[in-house]
Image (cartoon, rainbow, N blue to C red):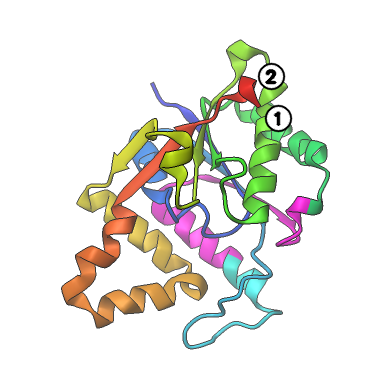
Amino acid sequence: MSKRILAIFPHPDDESYSKAGALALHAQQGDNITLICATSGQMGRRMGKPFFANRETLPLIREKELKAACENIGISDLRLWRLQDKTLQFEDPEELANKIELIIHEINPHIVYTHYPKLGVHPDHDALSHAAVLAVKRLPVNKRPVIYGSALVKDREKLLGKPNIELNLNEQLLKIKLEALRAHRTQTEYMLKKIEQDPENKDQILSAHRIEKFWIYPVDAS
């Protein structure tokens, strides 16, 4: 039986770093994936290497990159909100939750992927994941999707214990993930060039991308 998956992230490329393998696996299993991307990454620091974007063109370029990454992963339903990058922490969390709740009622997901609240490193990550929890918490207990949180802090296992989901990507999934990351050219070209310039250490460089870890967020404890 196929599942309905809702991924909730603030920036283009959030769906690819640390998550593309898991999402691609869902796509291979026939699951339907909806992605909310809250901003267009307007304030991203990277403009390609060498530069081919500027502050004015970056949002449109990053949206195109995101669409290409979604095609690689198998994400069929992309919702672009186009909110201002690096400002989600100043948005009313209840209003963000309202927007998320509408989509939850529309697609009735089994699983929600987002950053683990307060452990997402970036203020946008933490703000949107907090809103996602608020939206899920409004639902009756028996209708709540499971929240798989991606924690990015270095001491995450010390804080949270062992992950509930630890996915060791096979070569096919790793290839899909790398293609998704490659699609985000403005943000990842510097990293991919390291691999090309140092093939002997390719496996070591890629080791961080082979394993994806998720912790189930305890909604009732929040």
Count of marks, rendered view: 2
On screen, residue 2 versus residue 196, left or right, reads right
Q: Which amino acid does label 2 sit on?
A: Leu
Q: Indicate yes or no whether the magenta region holds residue 74.
A: yes
Q: Is mark 2 on a helix, strand or loop?
A: loop
Magenta-tinted stretch: 63-89
Q: Which residue is drawn at the image coordinates 31% and 40% (left, top)? A: 167
Hey, which residue is sitting farthest left in the picture?
200
Judging depth in this view, the residue of 14 and 205 nearest the camera is 205
Residue named by callout 1 = 135
- On the question of residue 174 being in view, the answer is yes
Q: What element carries label 1?
A: helix
On screen, residue 190 versus residue 175, left or right, reads right
Q: Position of residue 162 (x, y in %)?
A: 37, 34
- On the question of residue 30 being in view, the answer is no
Q: Which residue is drawn at the image coordinates 43% and 48% (left, top)? A: 19
Q: Tag 2: Cα neighbours inside 10 Å, few (<14), some, or many (≥20)?
A: some
The numbered disc on residue 139 is 2
- Does residue 118 sit above or below 178 in this rendering? above
Q: Which residue is drawn at the image coordinates 62% and 71% (left, top)? A: 44
Are the residues at dot 1 and dot 2 in contact (C-beta closer than 8 Å)? yes
Q: Residue 128 appears in which quarter of the rendering?
A: top right
Q: Position of residue 102 (x, y in %)?
A: 73, 32
Judging depth in this view, the residue of 65 and 100 nearest the camera is 100
Rounded to the nearest whole Å, what is the CA distance between mark 1 and mark 2?
7 Å
Q: Which amino acid does label 1 sit on?
A: Ala
